Amino acid sequence: MSSSKQALAHPAPGSGAAPGDKPGAARGAGGRGTPTPGPSSWRSRLYRWDMKAAPYAFISPFFIIFGAFGLIPLLYTGWYSLHNVQLSSLDHKSWAGLDNYRNLLSSDFFWNALKNTFTIGLISTVPQLLMAIGIAHLLNYRLRGSTVWRVVMLTPYATSVAAATLVFTLLYSWDGGMVNWLLGFVGVDPVNWRESTWGSQFAVSSIVIWRWTGYNALIYLAAMQAIPGDLYESAAIDGANRWQQFRHVTIPQLRPTILFTVVISTIGATQLFGEPLLFGGVSGSKGGSEHQYQTLGLYMYDQGWIIGNLGKASAIAWSMFLILLIVAAINLLFTRRLRKSQ
């Protein structure tokens, strides 16, 4: 009797388990018998963490570099634009609010630089893109040594800005320049390319055209080669010649690419700096003796590093940034309308 009572008071080790379970299952359900995670579970967790975090780790260098050399200087420049800061005394700055921007809006030099930027950008962008489309159309057909011609088209882009501007400065020289020498053959008087308004702006624009036409031509060529050949075959069957195929097949298919190059060229024209600075020589930062080709980039450089007014130069930089935002908004608007029309 005593043994049976002890058996009832102390159940068997497997009595708490369900029928058919292995001994120890009840303890495992209670938590005291749960085995610790093994190496396989840690590896699976590490694998899941690696799959989620690895893409962010791969792209993190770009954001780190952009934040250090792009975003932080941009925000710091915006903070400087709200202060009166001199290059000679960076530690002594005073709050100015929007006074630097008000001074820009009332400055004739700012509006002159904005007008020159627009004029030079228009003179350089339109011929550049038209020539690039024509060159790409020629290279798109079977041409002997097409690879060599493509490399030649890219050579000006690979040339240093300083080297290219130096050569063009010699070409547009008042005494002994090749351009005036050629004009003399057709009975045209020599032009003072540095001092005249339209002459200096045309000279600076020609440097930009020479450097970027081949680059845009290769972009157009890549877009042309992506056009299906069936479209040209259908147009040829309908009796369209090459010019009609170019107008009614090539150009409509190139609309997104043309819009992209227009936006990129506009951004480049807004930031134009090296060509006019080196072309002007001693008075390069002023854009000539009468500021006849001073762009926004030169005006910002002149205010910040020649005069030393960093607050006003920062306001000019942010004004250029706002202009680029407007250009991007116009690009987005045209892109949406282009997609709806298609």
Image (cartoon, grey):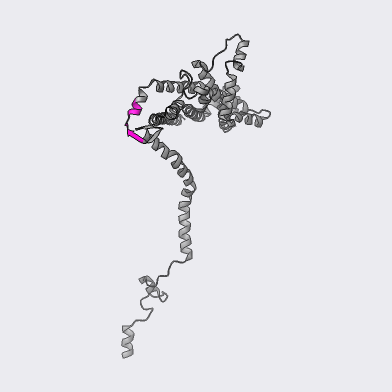
Q: Could you tell me residue 281's position as x and y percent?
A: 53, 23
One can see residue 335 in this view: yes
Q: Please, which residue is most extreme toward the bottom here?
A: 1
Q: Residue at x 40, y 23 (%)?
A: 110
Judge whether 177 appears above or below 77 on screen.
above
Is-magenta flag for residue 95? yes
Judge whether 54 appears above or below 141 on screen.
below
Q: Residue at x 41, y 40 (%)?
A: 72
Is-magenta flag for residue 339? no
Q: Nearer the viewer, residue 214 or 240?
A: 214
Please state if 75 lies on the left or on the right of 141 as rendered.
Answer: left
The image quadrant where one finds the N terminus is bottom left
Please state if 77 lies on the left or on the right of 277 as rendered.
Answer: left
Q: Could you tell me residue 6's position as x and y percent?
A: 32, 86
Judge whether 177 appears above or below 274 on screen.
above
Q: Nearer the viewer, residue 11 or 67?
A: 67
Q: Nearer the viewer, residue 12 or 220?
A: 220
Q: Please, which residue is most extreme toward the right here?
A: 144
Q: Which residues are magenta?
A: 92-102
Q: Could you tell me residue 262's position as x and y percent?
A: 49, 27
Q: Nearer the viewer, residue 4 or 164?
A: 164
